[in-house]
Structure formats: C-alpha cells, structure tokens
Amino acid sequence: MVMSLMVGEWKGEYSSEASGKFGIIEFNLTKGADDAHGQVFMKESLGPHSLQQPLVTTYFRPLAIKFVHAGDEVIHGIVDPYTDLKRNVTVHTSFKGKVIGDVMEGTYISTIEETNQSYIGKWKVTRQ
C-alpha cells in the first residue's frame, strides 16, 4: 500500500495561477498509520484595498489536510473547507497525485461553495 511509501516528514509548496493563491505544505506519517494528516499553510494578505491605505498584513493560515485514499502509487485527499476572507466565501479543496521515491506531486481543485466556480493548482512535496 502507498501509505507505507509515505512514512516520514514531508514539506513542499502549492500554487495556482488561476486563483493567485500559494503556500506551504507540511505533514508527517508514522509507520503503521492507516492514513496521513498534516497542514497546508496558505499565504493570505488582509488590509485596505485602496492606494490611500497601503497597510496590508500578510500571514500563513493553517488548514488541515487528510489523505483519504492511497493505492498503486496514487494518492487522493481533501483539505478542510475554509472561508476565503477577501471574498467571504467557503472553499472546498481536493487533491490527487503520485508518490515517486522521495517526491509526491500532483494537482488540486478548489471550488467556491457559493458560486460553484473552480480553479486548479499544482503541489509538490519532498521527504525530509
């Protein structure tokens, strides 16, 4: 099973040109576990949106991830739904990818609950 191939600490990044969102991924899988959990740290900026008010706060927001299926070197998972603070909408994200040695990479799709609009991005992590 692929979960045994995923044992260890993993770190990497994700990004989407369509949404402009990007961030850091970190998770750890211990031997004997049936699934993996971790966090995505999404970079967000909040603050005034006019030139007269330039103060903007940037931070990394943690979101929980869960691998829900792994087999034949293919993995699938979900990110906990979150509220996009700029647009005040709920976002649901799922991801898929492949495990090749010490690298996992794939794509994700995020869907805005209120409009059903979706965007795609890429992610990649390496074993530490």
Image (cartoon, helix red, strand yellow):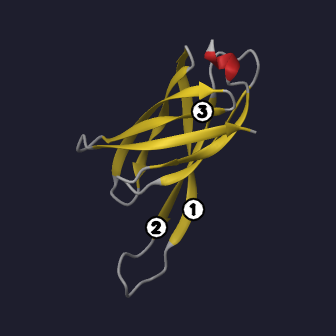
Please name which of the two marks, 2 or 3, marks the residue nearer to the observer.
Answer: 3
Q: Is residue 10 above or below residue 5?
A: below
Q: What is the distance, in whole Å, between disc 2 and disc 3 at their CAs? A: 31 Å
Residue carrying label 1: 59
Residues at circles 2 and 3 in contact by the CB criterion of under 8 Å: no
- For marks 2 and 3, the one nearer the N-term is 2
Q: Residues within 10 Å of mark 2 (few under 14, many from 20)?
A: few
**Could you tell me the amino acid type at mark 3?**
Met
Residues at circles 2 and 1 in contact by the CB criterion of under 8 Å: yes
Residue carrying label 2: 46
In front of the other: 89 or 8 = 8
Q: What is the distance, in whole Å, between disc 1 and disc 3 at their CAs? A: 25 Å
Element carrying mark 3: strand
Residue carrying label 3: 104
Element carrying mark 1: strand
Residue farthest to the top, as pictured:
1
In front of the other: 127 or 27 = 127
For image coordinates 23% across by 44% down, the residue present is 115
Q: What is the distance, in whole Å, between disc 2 and disc 1 at their CAs? A: 9 Å
Q: Is residue 66 above or below residue 58?
A: above
x then y, percent, for residue 62 = 58, 48
Residue farthest to the bottom, as pictured:
52
x then y, percent, for residue 25 = 60, 43
